Structure formats: structure tokens, C-alpha cells
Image (tube, rainbow, N blue to C red):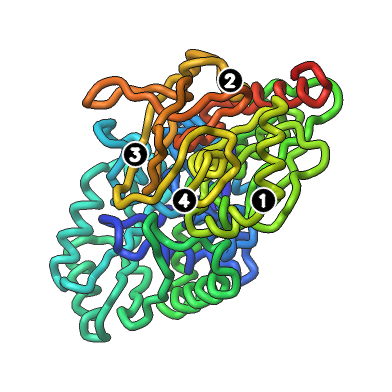
Amino acid sequence: MSTVTPRLVVAAPSSGAGKTTVATGLIAALAARGLKVSPHKVGPDYIDPGYHALAAGRPGRNLDAWMSGPERIAPLFAHGAAGADVAVVEGVMGLYDGAAGRGELASTAQVAKLLRAPVVLVVDASSQSRSVAALVHGFASWDPEVRLAGVILNKVASDRHETLLREALEEGSGVPVLGAVRRAGAVDTPSRHLGLVPAVERSVEALRAVREMGELVAASVDLDAVLALARTAPPLPVGPWDAAAEVEPVAGPRPRIALAGGAAFSFSYAENAELLAAAGAEVVPFDPLHDERLPERTAALVIGGGFPEVYVAELSANAALRKAVAELAANGAPVVGECAGLLYLGRELDGLPMCGVLDTAARMTTRLTLGYREAVALADSPLAAAGSRVRGHEFHRTATDPAAGPSPAWGWRTPAGPHTEGHLHGSVHASYLHLHWTGAPALPSRLVRHAADRAAGRTG
């Protein structure tokens, strides 16, 4: 079995060059032509895929070789791109930047090689002219296995500036210029302490921003050349990732697992819910900002990441739901909280009452905690068996007191020594660690089994 979807990777020499604007604009512009576009994002980021999804009209999916494993990248791509006419993969950081101290692991370059995809380099040309050729030549020659096949110039000042840049690249790099985006044409996408504001929070504004990105790219980039380049990607000798092949489905009635969503809990990977469903669960989304009760017959609860600190007043005011969550946990139902979910399950956030399931208080800080983690489960829980090893990432500006409960969820090593994190309390597993369950499919299988036992009355 092979995958033949035309595809390309949008990369940059560094963060801040404008690759999110260009990638989202490409997706929107190609979709406006009537093409079915499959959007993907290298790395763990949740926010960019939200804009991609608005542009494409289908889920934006992550390709993270650290969390999922390099061997799953091509199958996950094939799964996400099924039925698409073309796929656009936005990179992370600089083209060759990966997991710290791990070489190319989880870099855009590694993913491009795993996908056999041509790379388009977005270059911030605002402070250079002929030097752009040296920069592109260096990136094109650094790794011969990476096919840097096109350049999109961003933040170009004028026609004269564009001419100088094109002449330099034609003379000195041999990499074709696919487009030039004017500096004055930048699209404003609001940001906050962890990056861009998620698309789900902006509604009308997000749709307008995506439309403007598409119009900007359509007017500045040779879309026919982009499509021709994407079609040069050779077949991938893999079939699509299959959630059902990764898990062991439970027998009997499907337990209902409630999945928090909405603006406050918008960080989730589509494959996580797909794994729960494949393992036998009925996954039912709900919005803690608006729903005053959990879905009927909830047997387990998953509360993922997001920005609860932005909506702390509204979350606190929804006392009926906070009480329902606390009662569910007290009655022994499996409850999993990730980052924002941890904060919501705690006693308070920035002084306002939360669910009170865990005896910990959270607050906003000025310190960003960010990075990949390799963790081990320190005790049994409905999510993980003791000794289970996972790879995840942290990304937050909050702190909890205490930072870990009497029974921590995870442990890992740091340069300063062993570190414990998170809380295990009864049937509750809560932690700052974000996980892409494709890299640890035993976790959703275990959670669904516990939920099925709960639904069948086999646990307390």
C-alpha cells in the first residue's frame, strides 16, 4: 500500500519569519480554488492547526516525531490526508531545529524527509538583499536529503527590493522564488503569553484573518507553481495509520467518555479522540463554559489543555458543572486532566474556586515552562500502569501549590536531578504533561477499560 497525496512542507530559517501566515494562506488559497486541502503541523503546537482547520474545513493534524515516534509520521500523515487533493505541512521553529540534544529528532527537516516532501522556505527579507542567496544556499546544502525546492519571500519592501532579491537568488542559490509577500500586506493575528490566540476564541475575527491570509497569498504567490511542486513528491510506501489497529476494544456496551472542549479547553489532538472511539468508547464533547451538567451517563471524563486562566471567572461561575465534576470524581469515575484540566480540577485558579477535586491551588506566573519530557508513571492509575514510559511536552505559564501531590503522576530526570509532577487521587490522573496518545496507545485502551468497568458497575 502506498500514499500518493501531493504535498509540501512550509519551513523557515527561524521562528518569526511568517511561516504560519504563509502556510495558512496557502491552505485557504488552495481551498478557495475548490481543492481539498489536508493541513498538518510539525511539532506539538495546538494553536496553528486551529487556523489551518478554519482554512481547510477539515481537522488540522500534528506530526510530532518525539511524541508519536518517527515510524508513525508517514502513516499519520496518510491518515490525515486521506481523500485530499494536496497537503500543506507547516514546520516548527527553524528548518533544522529539533528536540534539544537529540539531533534532527522532531525537526521540520526530519519530518520532510520522512514524508519525502519538497520544502518551501519562507524567508523574512525585510533587512537584506543579496545576502538572501547565501542564506538560502546554506539551508539548501546543509542536508542533501532535504529537498529545498522553493522560496517565498516575506516582508518585501518594494518592487525594487523584490527585484534585487530575485536576482540574487537566481544568481546564487538555484532555488526558484515562488512568491513575494509585501511587508505592508501582513495580516494581524493577535497573540498572548503562549503564542497566537486560538482560532476557536476569535470566531468571526479568526475567519476574517484566515480569509485575508488566503487573499494575501493568492495575490503574492504562484499557486500553480506551488501545486506543481507538491505533485513532485513521490509515493510514500505506507498505508494510513489505523486507530483500530493500535488498541484493544472493550467488549459489551460502549462507555460514554465526556471530552471537555470549547474556548477554554481547545487544546486536543484529533487522534486522541479517535483512539478512544476505536477502543470502544462513545466520545461526547461538552463545553465547561456553557454546559451546566456533564453528558448523561458519563462514565469517564477527559479535560485537556487550553487557556482556563482567560476564562477563570466564567468557569468559576458555572458552579453547577464544577459540582458535577467533583461528584463524578468522588464516585470513582476515571478523570484525566492535562495542563488546563489540572488547573480546573484544583481547588482554585488565581483565587477563584475551581472543581476542588485536587487539593492544589494554581496561579498565573511570568515564567514559561516549555519543553519535551520523557516521563515514567510512578503508580497505577486509570490512565497508565506503573512503570509506563511516555514522551510528552509542557507548555504553560502557571504554577500549582503543591506542584505534585502525595502520589505524583509522572517522574522524569532533569539536569538538577529527579523531578516529580502531577497528581493521582483516587481515580483522577492530572498533570501538566501533554500527550499525543498515538505514541502510547496503551493509555487510551486502559482508560476505556476502566470507563467500561465503571459503566458496568464493576468498580466503586
The quarter of the picture where the N terminus appears is top right
Q: Nearer the viewer, residue 457 or 199?
A: 457
Residue 7 seen in render? no
Mark pair 4, 2: CA separation: 29 Å
Going by the numbered disc 1, the residue's amino acid type is Ala
Between discs 2 and 3, the one toward the N terminus: 3
Between discs 1 and 2, the one toward the N terminus: 1
Q: Nearer the viewer, residue 281 or 112?
A: 281
Looking at the rendered image, the disc whose residue lies closer to the viewer, 2 or 3, is 2
Between discs 1 and 4, the one toward the N terminus: 1
Q: Secondary structure at mark 1?
A: helix
Coordinates of residue 150 in the picture (x, y in percent): 34, 61
Going by the numbered disc 3, the residue's amino acid type is Gly
Between discs 1 and 3, the one toward the N terminus: 1
- The residue where tag 3 is placed is 371
Mark pair 2, 3: CA separation: 24 Å
Q: Are marks 1 and 4 in contact (CB under 8 Å)?
A: no
Q: Is residue 127 left or right of residue 341?
A: left
Mark pair 1, 4: CA separation: 15 Å
Mark pair 1, 3: CA separation: 34 Å
- The residue where tag 2 is placed is 381
Between discs 4 and 3, the one toward the N terminus: 4
Residue at horizontal 51 percent and vertical 29 percent from the top: 439
Q: Residues within 10 Å of mark 1 (few under 14, many from 20)?
A: some
Q: Residues within 10 Å of mark 3 (few under 14, many from 20)?
A: some
